[in-house]
Image (spheres, helix red, strand yellow):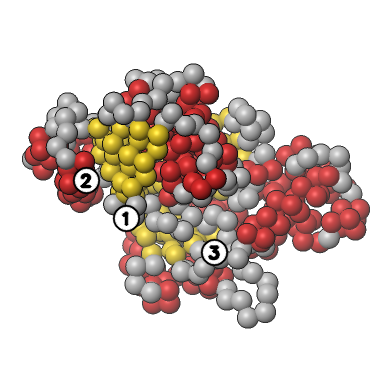
Amino acid sequence: MKNTTEMKQYIASGSFDSALSRLYSETELCEQRDRYVSLSETFASVYGERDNIRFFSAPGRTEVCGNHTDHNKGCVLAAGINLDAIACVSANADNTVRLKSVEYPKEDVVDLSVLTPLEDEKEHSASLIRGVAARFVQLGYKIGGFDCVTTNKVIAGSGLSSSAAFEVLVGTIFNYMYNDGKISAVEIAKIAQYAENVFFGKPCGLMDQTACSVGGFVQIDFADTEKPVITPVSFDFASCGHALVITDTRASHADLTDEYAAIRKEMEAVAACFGKSCLRETDEKEFFANMALVREKCGERACLRAIHFFNDNHRVEKEAAALKDGDFETFKKYVIESGNSSYMYNQNVFVKIKDAGQPVSLALALSDSVLNGKGAWRVHGGGFAGTIQAFVPNDLLDCYISTLESVFGAGACHVLSIRSVGGTEVC
């Protein structure tokens, strides 16, 4: 293991490139080399010269299909992306985690002798560190102290799961530093979800953490939420002639909690008509045969959202099969179908109140105008505000970006690629 100065020189010389090549494309290597050098310098400035410097990485994720299906035990298709959170780490003997993020002024200091939720930590990153550590101990794994500097390129508020990337990063550090990397990526994802649910205080599903931890295209079946079936989907995205573009419409997610909650509530209300707790447990044919009853009890929007659930749940398998077959044109067709279903049936593209803006709708309309017949586009993530996803042919990429950014501003479009490696030790 190298000390801080040696590691900085090792990276700058290009000797670290083979490790970086596992995670980043050749065109990204120069930028990433500088990024890791900078992080090692920041570590030295915060914690001083140290021996045994190690680097870790966890990617963000993009939801590809299965929009608002996971919370009703449905299926999703997601993928790790090339934007990631990274950490420069050195172990300490203090049984304390000290974590300084480049993006935030406050250092998190977590005493690992206290592994219960603290009220004043809720909704803060320290709660996630403590929650991950607590779950490790509950499951019989080892933990220990470390000093750490992180930086996160996963864009906050973009629907790319910057928080899940951070949680998985912390779990990955504990895994490799104190458990020889023996804990599976799926187990790390579950640990991360536990930390967010119990310590941070957010009742999230497992999709985000799984995609970040496993990497690549991944199909997830949540029929048994304790033991989700996770199937990697082999597809060489770099060879398909398209770019993945996430466009941030820069609309606020504030005051949308009730909108998000209503989707789950209405889906579960439909399931309750049949004595079930969620739509995945509800017989689809029985639902359609009793539509009049469901409409009377739950209303038309709940019926439409249930239709979206059933259709998108089936569509996950179709998209995954198309990727496995190398049939990207069929894959794109299903992406558009999924987006249309979110728009018309799930109705999570805009907020239906007077004077509310419709930036996501406009972004989708512009995407249709530029890409019609050639690419694919859909709402991304929770919806109502925020981001859209598009698969853009490389020869239309410049036109697409200029069109969207002429409306939503410079830098609104983020060109991404799919990363095959999930949470990992880099070196």
> Three-letter amino acid code at disc 1?
Pro
Disc 2 packing (10 Å; few <14; some 14–19; many ≥20) = some
Q: Which dot marks residue 46?
A: 2
| Circles 1 and 2 in contact, beta carbons < 8 Å | no
Task: Please give the residue where the numbered disc 1 appears in the rendered image.
Answer: 105
Question: Which residue lies at the image location 38% right of the left edge and 74% below the top edge?
Answer: 409
Q: Is residue 42 left or right of residue 372?
A: left
Near-viewer residue (200 or 6): 200
Dot 2: element: helix
Q: CA distance from mark 2 to mark 3?
A: 34 Å
> Three-letter amino acid code at disc 2?
Val
Task: Please give the residue where the numbered disc 3 appears in the rendered image.
Answer: 253
Considering only order in the chain, which callout, 2 or 1, is on the residue closer to the N terminus?
A: 2
Picture quarter with the C terminus: top left
Classify 220 as above or below 315. above
Q: CA distance from mark 1 to mark 2?
A: 12 Å
| Circles 3 and 1 in contact, beta carbons < 8 Å | no
Residue 222, image x, y percentages = 63, 35
Residue 370, image x, y percentages = 45, 70
Q: CA distance from mark 3 to mark 1?
A: 24 Å
Dot 1: element: loop
Q: Is residue 215 left or right of residue 427?
A: right
